Image: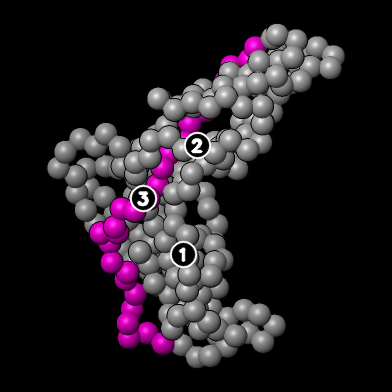
Amino acid sequence: MLRITDIQVGHTTNNCITDARPNIRFALESDVDGEALDHAVIRCGGWSIRTTNQLNNVYDGSWSPFTTYDLRIEAFGTSGEQAVANASFTTGRLDTPWKGQWITDGLYSFPEKESPVPMVFRKEFALGKTVKKAWINATALGIYVMELNGQRVGEDYFAPGLTSYEHQIQYQTYDVTKLLQNRNEIMVTVAGGWAAGAFTYGRKSHISCDRQAFL
């Protein structure tokens, strides 16, 4: 029996959220000796590709922000057996402008070769309607941890990670639909991290900014 045992979309096995055209790869397993891939057909809406490559299949179909796309992979072995599996991915912001503004404590400063004291940002908001889906796009100059109604948002540590801040800042997308209530409180703690905090052998700080900030 031919089986598709693993699918990676954008180099992740589940919940891929991406601003770049994702690469689709899949692994096969068979009980038939000498079995190999003859060809596969990957479909997503009106887009499809016929391929003999299990590792490099770039999706170039329809492309809209904040949209989930369902994939179907049909693999055909040299023995004539067939395997089918499904996967999905979600697009991020793409070119959608940020409505949010960077926030920080503009009066705060700290000595060279030291890390800043973490900043805590807090906001309350109420819901006037039933919410079908809600998500948070977030990033920081520094590193952050977020809570919504006392529950931690996401499983990341040291988000958004080390990057070349002058050229690119990564952001995270978190589904918070199940955490919402009628009245809500969001709280974010932001430390200096690699952007403002002290690190390297010489304990250098203020490398990419004067203080941490959150978006």
Amino acid type of the residue tagged 1 in the rendering: Ile
What coloring was used for the rendering?
Answer: one colour
What percent of the width, then of the height, locates residue 115?
53, 81
Q: Is residue 202 magenta?
A: no
Asked if residue 4 can be seen in this view, the reply is: yes
- Secondary structure of the residue carrying tag 1 is loop
Q: Is residue 144 above or below residue 32?
A: below
**Which quadrant of the figure contains the N terminus?**
top right
Marks 1,3: beta carbons within 8 A:
no
Q: Identify the residue at image location x=69%, y=9%.
A: 81
Residue highlighted by disc 1: 169
Q: Distance from label 1 to label 3 (Cα)? A: 13 Å
Q: Identify the residue at image location x=44%, y=49%.
A: 19
- For the residue pair 41 and 139, the one nearer the viewer reads as 41
Label 3 crowding class (10 Å Cα cut-off): few <14, some 14-19, many 20+?
some
Residue highlighted by disc 2: 59
Asked if residue 151 can be seen in this view, the reply is: no
- For the residue pair 131 and 208, the one nearer the viewer reads as 208
Amino acid type of the residue tagged 2 in the rendering: Tyr
The magenta-colored residue range is: 82-109
**Which quadrant of the figure contains the C terminus?**
bottom left
Q: Distance from label 2 to label 1 (Cα)? A: 24 Å
Q: Is residue 12 above or below residue 1?
A: below
Amino acid type of the residue tagged 3 in the rendering: Arg
Residue 63, image quadrant: top left
What percent of the width, then of the height, locates residue 5?
67, 24
Residue highlighted by disc 3: 93
Q: Is residue 94 magenta?
A: yes
Label 1 crowding class (10 Å Cα cut-off): few <14, some 14-19, many 20+?
some
